[in-house]
């Protein structure tokens, strides 16, 4: 009989995590590059947490081949993989006759192999890598893809410590601290020549932060507690890009919050198909190679992923419905770091770029859409479908608004309090609200100010939040130049942009995208040639320029767009470009997608496919 307990607050897991809690996870996995599989076992230490003992353990799985289960060392046969339901996968039921007393811990070992349908892993043959010498693989588990590597309680509301024992013929990186030298594995069939890479994670973390990568990976130092790892040929450039700023960013974040907790902050620069700008895997941020632009101008991604070490990794959203607690806080901290390094106007400058992304996302979903709310209802939904700039930017604006309401120096005392109180835990938006009101209850002015907050509107009102008065000092010139381009006869000159930074040109291009009428094809060409956008190595510029060209039906950008779509898999660039290309040449868009199917990560493939169906 199932115990009667409240349903979990995370609707995107089918696990009964309100009956059992994962305390520790030992992932013992071999990487088989030939079969493109991981195989081995996970051992979950599961604690019974209810008075009325639950007689079954239910875990999330998706396309995992479960082979054998033992509990406390004894093989059991009373388990079943239930029928798959989208998007959550096939629940794994393990019977626990009689249940277990509250507080008892079972060690559940599950032998498994991943399958071809695994959505978390991307595999590369040697020919698909930059130097063509060795195969490569990496994982991307956020939001709910861990369950396609191993059965688990795949919810950010559950945190556990980890041991990684990964066998591979090639170097391995993981979201844990290395236990030092790897030892040789003897004798196992087909595994001659593999090494055992051991890591541990002592800070409890949610399943979505489990991460591994393996391949021809070289490593260099970028700071006193930081390494960068990437392909040997790419190492020098990656090191140069980050060595000046990484430790600086860590120090600033520590000043704002408190000491960095994860010992090392390292960065793995991935192959170009990596579907995100960055992923905050503990100890090793995973990053797109597009941040290595040779000008140190695109490492805001590092400030962002580093900030997740507090917001998201130490203090986690309890479910993807409260994703803004991860990303809004992180965007807020990222911009505080930028303001500390480059000056306060940079905070609003970055917020202005963010506002455009926010407005685009709201337009894309529709102003009344559920996914435009700060707190979303995700019951029955795939969190990947709800992903957009909205939790980032609306979340940022909520925090920025609160900061201004109570005053910066008062607000700054709340930041460490919040992160200390919730460290190693998960919370939802209501707990955030309680923590905030509670903290300021002894401060008369602050609590009076906070009475004005319309919590329901901030949490549940769809569409754009109130637009603040930005400090536009860094964008005024971009706006006036964009205005000049409204005149179809405007004669540009390279000197127009002489003293604009790359990010100011980003603002210029985004403002041109907002014109009531698209540019003429001839204007689009003039824009590209006069401002040397056709030659830019900075993907933030190239992608925006190509979009302007597509909007202008400028046929000279169709082919370069298709080419770029075969070179980069970061969804931020890929999805808008496919959408814009499909509008003007659907055939070319579909042909390009088909051609590059194997280049893209499974998540990217899925999302672009869904975009095509809209
Ligand atoms: N955690 C996200 C990436 C993510 C979100 C992966 C949801 C899967 C599901 C990461 O921290 C992120 O926000 N990356 C941004 C970086 C940017 C805001 C600087 C990205 O990928 O563009
Ligand atoms: Zn983030």
Image (spheres, rainbow, N blue to C red):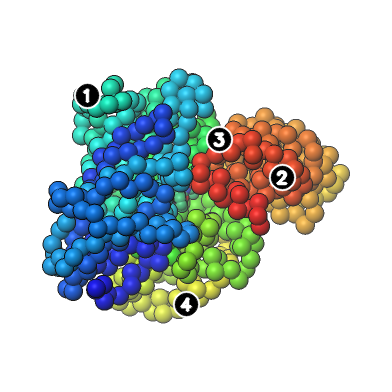
Q: CA distance from mark 2 to mark 3?
A: 19 Å
Drawn side of residue 391 relative to residue 502, left or right:
left
Q: Which residue is mark 1?
A: 187
Q: Does the closest atom of ligand 1 sit within 8 Å of the Cβ of label 2?
A: no
Nearer-N-terminus badge (4/2): 4
Task: Residue 599: give its label.
Answer: 3
Between marks 4 and 1 in the image, the one whose residue lies nearer the viewer: 1
Above or below 125: residue 542: below
Quadrant of the image containing the N terminus? bottom left
x and y percentages locating residue 92 in the rendered image: 33, 57
Seen from the viewer's position, the closer of residues 408 and 151 is 151
Nearer-N-terminus badge (1/3): 1
Quadrant of the image containing the C terminus? bottom right
Q: CA distance from mark 1 to mark 3?
A: 35 Å
Q: Are marks 4 and 1 in contact (CB under 8 Å)?
A: no
Nearer-N-terminus badge (2/3): 2
Seen from the viewer's position, the closer of residues 70 and 170 is 70
Q: CA distance from mark 4 to mark 2?
A: 39 Å
Nearer-N-terminus badge (4/1): 1
Q: Which residue is mark 4?
A: 456
Q: Which residue is mark 2?
A: 581
Q: CA distance from mark 4 to mark 1?
A: 62 Å
x and y percentages locating residue 398 in the rendered image: 47, 66
Between marks 4 and 2 in the image, the one whose residue lies nearer the viewer: 2
Q: Are marks 4 and 3 in contact (CB under 8 Å)?
A: no
Drawn side of residue 566 relative to residue 528, left or right:
left
Q: Are marks 1 and 3 in contact (CB under 8 Å)?
A: no
Question: Measuring 44% from the left and 65% from the top, which residue is drawn there?
Answer: 321
Question: Measuring 60% from the left and 43% from the top, which residue is drawn there?
Answer: 574
């Amino acid at each position: 009989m199932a115990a009667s307990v409240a349903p979990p607050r995370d609707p995107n897991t089918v696990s009964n995590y309100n009956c059992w809690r994962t305390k520790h996870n030992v992932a013992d996995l071999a990487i088989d590059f030939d079969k493109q599989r991981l195989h081995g076992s996970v051992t979950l230490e599961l604690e019974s947490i209810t008075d009325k003992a639950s007689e079954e353990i239910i875990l999330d799985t998706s396309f995992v081949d479960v082979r054998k289960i033992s509990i406390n060392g004894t093989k059991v046969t009373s388990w079943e993989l239930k029928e798959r339901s989208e998007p959550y996968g096939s629940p794994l039921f393990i019977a626990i006759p009689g249940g277990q007393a509250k507080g008892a811990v079972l060690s559940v070992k599950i032998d498994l192999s991943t399958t071809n349908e695994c959505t978390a892993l991307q595999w590369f043959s040697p020919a698909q890598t930059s130097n063509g010498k060795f195969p490569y693989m990496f994982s991307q588990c956020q939001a709910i893809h861990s369950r396609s590597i191993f059965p688990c309680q795949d919810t950010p509301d559950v945190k556990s410590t980890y041991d990684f024992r990964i066998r591979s013929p090639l170097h391995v990186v993981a979201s844990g601290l290395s236990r030092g030298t790897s030892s040789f594995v003897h004798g196992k069939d087909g595994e001659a020549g593999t090494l055992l890479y051991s890591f541990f994670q002592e800070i409890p973390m949610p399943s979505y932060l489990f991460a591994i990568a393996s391949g021809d990976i070289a490593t260099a130092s970028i700071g006193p507690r930081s390494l960068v790892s990437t392909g040997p040929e790419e190492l020098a450039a990656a090191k140069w890009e980050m060595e000046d700023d990484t430790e600086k960013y860590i120090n600033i974040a520590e000043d704002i919050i408190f000491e960095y907790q994860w010992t090392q902050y390292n960065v793995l620069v991935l192959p170009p198909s990596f579907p995100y700008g960055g992923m905050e895997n503990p100890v090793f941020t995973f990053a797109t190679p597009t941040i290595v632009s040779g000008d140190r101008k695109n490492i805001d991604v590092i400030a962002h992923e580093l900030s997740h070490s507090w917001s998201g990794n130490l203090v986690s959203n309890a479910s993807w419905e409260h994703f803004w607690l991860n990303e809004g806080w992180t965007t807020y901290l990222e911009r505080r770091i930028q303001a500390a390094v480059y000056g306060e106007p940079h905070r609003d400058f970055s917020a202005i770029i963010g506002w455009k992304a926010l407005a685009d996302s709201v337009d894309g979903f529709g102003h009344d859409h559920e996914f435009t709310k700060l707190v979303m209802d995700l019951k029955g939904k795939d969190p990947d479908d709800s992903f957009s700039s909205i939790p980032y930017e609306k979340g940022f604006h909520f925090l920025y608004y609160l900061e201004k309401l109570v005053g910066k120096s008062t607000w700054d005392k709340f930041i460490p309090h919040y992160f200390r109180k919730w460290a190693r835990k998960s919370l939802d938006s209501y707990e955030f609200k309680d923590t905030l009101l509670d903290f300021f209850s002894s401060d008369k002015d602050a609590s009076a100010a906070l009475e004005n907050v319309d919590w329901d509107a901030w949490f549940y009102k769809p569409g754009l939040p109130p637009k603040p008065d930005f400090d536009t000092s860094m964008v005024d010139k971009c706006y006036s130049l964009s205005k000049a381009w409204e005149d179809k006869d405007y004669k540009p000159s390279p000197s127009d942009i002489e003293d604009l930074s790359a990010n100011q040109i980003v603002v210029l291009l985004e403002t041109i995208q907002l014109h009531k009428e698209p540019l003429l094809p001839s204007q689009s060409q003039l824009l590209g040639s006069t401002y040397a956008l056709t030659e830019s190595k900075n993907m933030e510029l190239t992608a925006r320029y190509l979009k302007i060209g597509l909007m202008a039906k400028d046929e000279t950008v169709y082919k370069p767009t298709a080419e770029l779509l075969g070179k980069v898999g970061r969804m931020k660039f890929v999805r808008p470009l496919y959408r814009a290309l499909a509008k003007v040449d659907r055939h070319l868009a579909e042909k390009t997608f088909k051609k590059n199917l194997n280049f893209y990560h499974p998540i990217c493939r899925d999302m672009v496919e869904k975009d095509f169906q809209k």
